[in-house]
Amino acid sequence: MNVIGSQDHPVPFEAWEEPEMRRALAARDISSVYKLLRRVGISQRQIAALTGQSQSEVSEILKGRQVMAYDVLARVSDGLGVNRGYMGLAYDEGTATSVVGQPDGALAEEDESVKRRKFITNTAAVMFGSSVLDTDPSEWLSSLPQTPVPDRIGMTDVKQVEASTKVLRALDYQYGGGACRDAVVAQLSWGQRLISATTTEVTRKNLFRALADLQNLAGWTTFDVGMLDSSRNHFARAIEFAKLSGDDGLMSNVLYRMGRVYLHHNEPNEALKMFQFGQIAAQNSGSELAVAVLCANEAWAYAMMNDPIQTQKLIGRARDEFSRANLDEAPDWVRFFNETDMQATIGTVHTELSAWDVKHSAIAIPAISNALAGYNDAMARSKAFNLTMLATNHMREGDVDHGVRIGRDALTLARTLKSVRVVDRLEPLQIEAARRGANSDARDLSAGIQRLWAS
């Protein structure tokens, strides 16, 4: 990734701030962008090398050929070192247009007193009118402007990004990704534009670290609502920012979360690759807790492949690493992995193994029960996952009535959460309930899950 204003980048930072250049970028007029670069001494050969295009392609674009494909626009943006937000490409096609507004200067010129009157009229219409949604704000506000970015930033600005990420992460845990993803992406719109500000090298590294964590959360919340490609894009950016920050522990966490994406999509081999990459970063970081997280999730992958020996080895190592970890000093992105989550992971891997051999349910049930005792309302999504697994294990052991009662609780909680993952993870429970169709309560539970899937 090329960074705006970096010393080794051939395009000077000032080139991107010229009004004519900013208009061309906002319009995604790549032909004009290339022409303006030629004016500041950037050759066709340099443009081709930076963007990964052939010189003939660059020549055709300079002659007026339009660039429309999103992936090509993103490659051009990254290669040239342009802040993606300048081109409305900050995240993905679905979110860029909704969170990246036009700069304040792009608003139509109009007397301030006229704008005030129209605002008052609109307010009155909202407060006293019969139809709020019929009000047209375009008469007094032509577009939503971006908040201006400071010319110079310090650690206070970085701390603000970190604080926002912490609050949004808590919302994700409690209500699911669907409750906060748009807010996370909007925060990225602001945060990533801070890269263009002047600052010290130390602050810039801390900014990259904060943005890596925010991209990490964006990937996680996007994954939670079922947007696989977009989540992968966010995680890819998170890895780049983590690399620029030099934080191996954060790098390991991003890779762990990407591995979890593959686990959810029943690709344990692909998940293992991510976890193994993450393990390298975790060990480089010197964080026992980061290593424990990766070991525990590698165990999950092996359990999905019905390899109880490797599963037990890795759970054992996860326990050992966890026992040496200092949770009080752990950063927010990994602090979730406490004794409660360790119990939940043990329950999870034995639930996976119980699909192959029911004796593992006897280990899964007490571990999951311990985890549920440790979760409060702020961890509602984790509670839903564990209720689902607990019900599934009771069904597998033949305690259908108890399994149905817990399964109903899981289904009720799933309905309240804005999480596709929670709904998807009901599948093993639905299968077990459907197998016991002779039991009317089990049959009703199976039908209830199917209705939720269809809704």
Image (cartoon, rainbow, N blue to C red):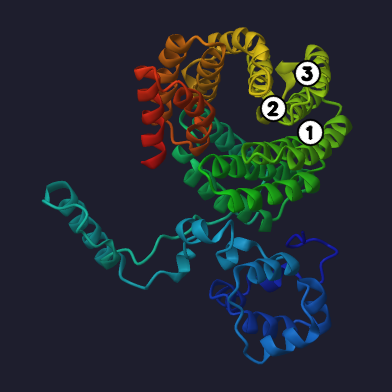
| Relative height, residue 376 to residue 191 (above, below) | above
Q: Residues within 10 Å of mark 3 (few under 14, many from 20)?
A: many
2 or 3: mark nearer the eye: 3
Q: Amino acid at mark 2?
A: Val
Secondary element under disc 1, as helix, strand or loop, is: helix
Reading the image, the residue beneath label 2 is: 334
Q: Position of residue 157 (x, y in %)?
A: 62, 43
State left or right for residue 243 relative to residue 139.
right
Above or below for 266 versus 41? above
Mark count:
3
Q: Could you give the CA–CA distance between mark 1 and mark 2, rounded to whole angstroms?
A: 9 Å
> Residue visible at 61% across and 53% down?
229
- Seen at 70% across and 30% down, the residue is 304
Q: Quadrant of residue 196?
A: bottom right
Nearest the eye: 227 or 194: 227
Which mark is on residue 315?
Answer: 3
| Label 2: which secondary element | helix
Q: Amino acid at mark 1?
A: Gly
- Label 2 environment density (alpha carbons within 10 Å; few <14, some 14–19, many ≥20): some
Q: Nearer the viewer, residue 233 or 309?
A: 309
The image's mark for residue 249 is 1
User: Which mark's residue is nearer the viewer, 1 or 3?
Assistant: 3
Q: In the image, residue 52 lies at what x, y percent?
A: 78, 73
Residue density around tag 1, few if under 14, some if 14–19, many if 20 or more, within 10 Å: many
- Indicate the amino acid at tag 3: Ile
Q: Are marks 1 and 2 in contact (CB under 8 Å)?
A: yes
Is the Cβ of the residue at disc 1 closer than 8 Å to that at disc 3? no
Q: Is 283 located above or below residue 10 in the figure? A: above
